[in-house]
Amino acid sequence: MKAKQLSLIMAISFICCMFFASFAAAANSNPLETWKPKFDPSGAKYKCIVSNVSSPVLTGSSTGFAIRDKLWERTNGQIYIDYKPLSVLGGEVEVLNMLQMGAIQGMGVSSVAATNLGPRFGLVNLPFLINSFEKLDKFVNSGKLFDHYMKAMEHQGIIGLDITGYGNYGWATTKPVKSMKNAKKIKFRVAEAEVNQLLYTQWELNPVVMPWPDVPTALKQGVITGLDHTPSVCNITKKFEVAKYYTYLNYAQGLFIWIFNKTWFESLPADLQKTFKEVISEVCQDIREKTKQQEIDQINMAKENGIEFFSLPEADLATLKEKGNAVHQEYAEEINKIYNQDAEVAYKPENFLLDVQQYMGYK
């Protein structure tokens, strides 16, 4: 009897030890461990906390780490970028407020959330305007148009320095969407952004506005049955584990806009400001090229894992374009607003949206 009791106690003890070991391992696991700097940042003279909502596995989101390492090297360890992706600091709207107040110094904000403090940033969310990698390259190289675009938040005390992307927007859904008739039965999560909400109203679909960190639970529980997002994001962040269908729309390019608190930035010595801008420009240009290949790779990986991809009929796409044009018109006043900071430069457009539409060949 004692031997049996001893064996039982030993078995229970072993199970408990295994449980607590597993719990401890989970508690101590750090998804960002592989991204730790290969240098000691404690001696940095200037520290810059930068937030991002997404996973650094996404090429556009990994920008923060690339900037960190290159800036450390180029400034001889004077500036340390403490990069915090994966919504570590919270949802984008609340983090934007932290940035404006100076609680953090930078952010790789998504183009959809950026409109909350810089409506002009909503330009790239307008349907079928800048809706391919090629068109995005053209816009970035447009000179005065892109420069004006990047000043969208300066009246809020926030400067924009450059952009990276995360691909072409479409629909990831829990049921196949092969037509607009199918789409009307889907509850689409959309970002907390006016342009997107206007667009889904014009498209006569069913938007559910929610912060990105709330999406996984909402998708699993059926609160939403679709996502307005890109293939790379859906595959990398495992949304395809629930939403196993994807419909190509390619109506807009998803961007991360790299923005910084203006007061903090201008507190840097002039030479470091110059280096800061140069590094971000170099890194972003490189990342944009890598993002193109990542979308191809992620789509292929998703297909290999059984995700089905569809395209809408041309007639349905034409309807989306026609109805989407109303959002161009409705949001034009916000995009065309001129602020005090805009008066400091030569280009002061009467109709910025029209200038961009003509430059991009939008019809």
Image: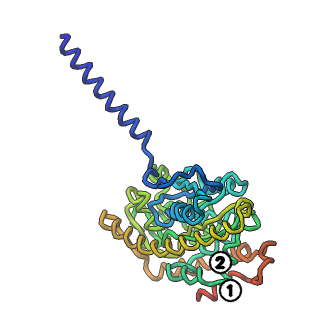
Can see residue 235? yes
Q: Which residue is mark 2?
A: 328
On-image quarter of the N terminus: top left
Give the side of residue 66 with respect to residue 263, left or right: left
Q: How dense is the environment of label 2, judged by Cα within 10 Å: few (below 14), some, or many (20 and up)? A: many
Q: Is residue 253 left or right of residue 332?
A: left
Above or below for 357 versus 220? below
Q: Nearer the viewer, residue 312 or 55?
A: 55
Residue in the picture at 53% in, 79% down = 319
- Image-quadrant location for residue 45: bottom right
Which label number is shown at residue 198? none
What residue is shown with label 1? 355
Residue 233 location (% of width, % of height): 46, 63
Looking at the image, the residue that sits furthest to the top is 1
Residue at the (63%, 69%) spot, across then down: 275
Q: CA distance from mark 1 to mark 2?
A: 13 Å
Q: Dot 1 surroundings within 10 Å: few (below 14), some, or many (20 or more)?
A: few
Whether residue 209 appears in this view of the structure is no
Please identify the quarter of the rendering in which residue 3 is found.
Answer: top left
The answer to whether 321 is drawn above or below residue 199 in the figure is below
Marks 1, 2: nearer the viewer: 1
Circle 1: residue type: Asp
**Position of residue 211 measured from the top left corner of the image (x, y, whole percent):** 57, 55
